[in-house]
Structures are given as C-alpha cells and as structure tokens.
Image (spheres, rainbow, N blue to C red):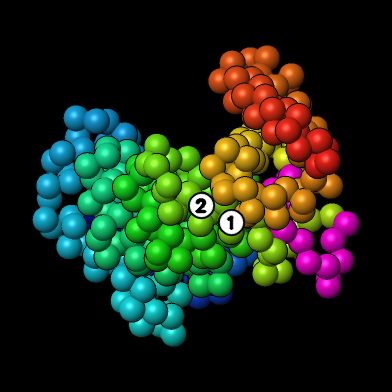
Amino acid sequence: MQLYEFLLKVCTSNDPDVGEESNSQPNSLSNNCIKNGHIVYSKKCEAMNRLFAEITGEDENLELLFNSKELLQYMTLNLNPAHIQKLEEKKEKELIFYEGIGLAILIIMGNLARKDEYSQFYANSILSEFIVSYWITRTSKVDIRSCFAAVGVIRNLCILDSNKGILTRLGLLDAVYPWINSSVVPIQSKTLGIYRHLTLSKIPNCDAKFKTVKFLLSVSSGLDIENLTNISETEQITRIKQIIDIAGSSDILSVRCESVRLLISILKVLIIEFNEKERDQYVQTISVMNILEPIVKLIIIEGATHQLLAVEGIDCLSVLAAFDSKHSGYGI
C-alpha cells in the first residue's frame, strides 16, 4: 500500500517536464487525471490495482491479510465518509489520491469477503455502514470505478444468510436501487445480483428475504427510471415491472440473466412463502405483466448452454403452473 500511495502521489503531482498549459490535460498513461467527470488512473496505478486483485484472489493469502490490524485500521480510516468529505473542497489531485486509495481498499475487501468468516466480520463492522451510506450511493461524489468496487463488496457480503438482515437494516435496499438502470453494465449486473442474493435464504421466515421481495413488488420512488422505455414522467411503476423491462430489453447477457434470475426468485418467494392475503394482493398486480416470456427465453437460449439456468426457469414455471391451476382466475 505504501508503494501504491507513492505512485498515486507521484502521478497526481505536477510533472516538471510538462508546461503549465499542458499540465491541465495530463497524459493518462503516466498521470492520474479527471476526464469527462471520471478518474483515469495511470498505467502504474492500474497495474498495482491488478496486483491487489491477483494477491487477494488467491485463497492462501486471505488469512494473512485479514489478520492484519494495520490493514483494518487503514480500511477504517480511508473508507470513512467523514474523512473523505473533508477533502471535497480541496485540490483535484488530493481527491484523486484518496479515491484511488478507496478503490484499492474496496478491491481487497471484496476478495476477502469471499470467505464466510471474513464476510460476516465485515458485515458486522462499521465498514459495511460506510459502504452502504456513501460508497454505493449514486447521489454521492464517488467515482464510478470506486462505486463499482463497492457494489462488488456488497454483493459478496449478501451471499451469506447471516449478513442479509444487517445489510437491509443499514438501508441497502434503497441505497443501491438507483443503479439498477445504470448504463454501466458491470454495476447494473452486480446490483441485480445483490437483490437476487437477498431473495435467497435457507433461514425459515427470513425477514430480509421478505423485506426485499416486498420492496421489489412495491411502487418505485421514481429514482433513475430515465433509461426505461414507454414510461411517462408521472407514471408510477412497480420495481418488478422495471426488472421485467430490463429482462426483456437488455442485449447484455450478464444483465439479462441476472434480471431474469431475480424475477424467478421473486416469483417463487411470493407464490410459495407469502401468506395468502399478501400473496393475492401482489398477484393481482403482476398478473397483467409479461413475466413468462423472459423466463421461457432464459430456458431456451441461455439454458441451452447453462443447465442451471434451464433448471431454475423450469422450476419457476412449474410453481406458477401449480398455483394457476388452483387460482385459474389469475391467469399468470
């Protein structure tokens, strides 16, 4: 990390060989700069971040890194929104430096969170609160690269059942939702993955699972629906309608698969696990939506090469068919 800090500082400082006029548009190969509102890191810093990803991607390195008190203190200091926000009025190069530090930490933390024990620790620590309240919030000034890494951390934390309730209580459902229609494909895909993992739980009557499904079946607050087609400014739509629209219109395989798998999970929880009164209320709403087409396409197209996707889709159709045979009035 000390070497990375050195490279960030060197690359954001003025180059004595470059004139004052040219320095306002530094060479992104050797300098960090802000271009079109986003940080472009130098090749050296990019190489360091790839190195962090490689090191933390190896399971045998995880224990040493996780047990480092110095690294934990470093994470806690540099992910703290209060620490970052003090810099917002300062020079561009200082903001780039701390964004770069945040990006590296989030890459490391995301890989450490692959192990259940470490994932549980981070979910219960102040770090998860920092990430949910600041680093994944679309209204914050976080650079898109850092935000992508932060969303990746949260997605990994959501896999473990014991973490789901903690994260939903921190306000994750509302915080990450504006990214569901992001034009940045990796963020959109991971956001859909976050909700899918939250709807999956082996814990009986998991509160976080029901809370997530109800959230996705409810009316959208209107945040970030500009990328959807055929939606007027005043029209209220449910979040599941937005998910169905994404599933039916996206040309990106990862986004299409994640959105359909999320739709499948929502439907199965609704039909199988909700009490009859609540279930029937929501079924009335979704019965007019095109929920079958994206599921059938998943089975036929993606399921042809990925058997798990075909199994998930067929299983969902069997649940819907069994329900519809008992409640023929709905015609799902």
Residue pictured at 68% horizontal, 64% vertical: 220
Q: To which residue does mark 1 refer?
A: 214
Q: Please state the extent of the stretch shown in magenta in the rendering.
A: 230-246
Q: To which residue does mark 2 refer?
A: 210
Q: Nearer the viewer, residue 293 or 224?
A: 293
Residue pictured at 66% horizontal, 60% vertical: 218
Residue pictured at 83% horizontal, 72% vertical: 234
Asked if labels 1 and 2 touch by Cβ distance under 8 angstroms, the answer is yes
Evaluate whether residue 265 shows in this view: no
Left or right: 307 with respect to 64? right
Amino acid type, callout 2 = Phe
Left or right: 76 with respect to 240? left
Left or right: 309 with respect to 240? left
Evaluate whether residue 140 shows in this view: yes
Residue pictured at 70% horizontal, 22% vertical: 299
Residue 173 x %, y % = 51, 60
Q: Disc 1 on helix, strand or loop?
A: helix
Amino acid type, callout 1 = Lys
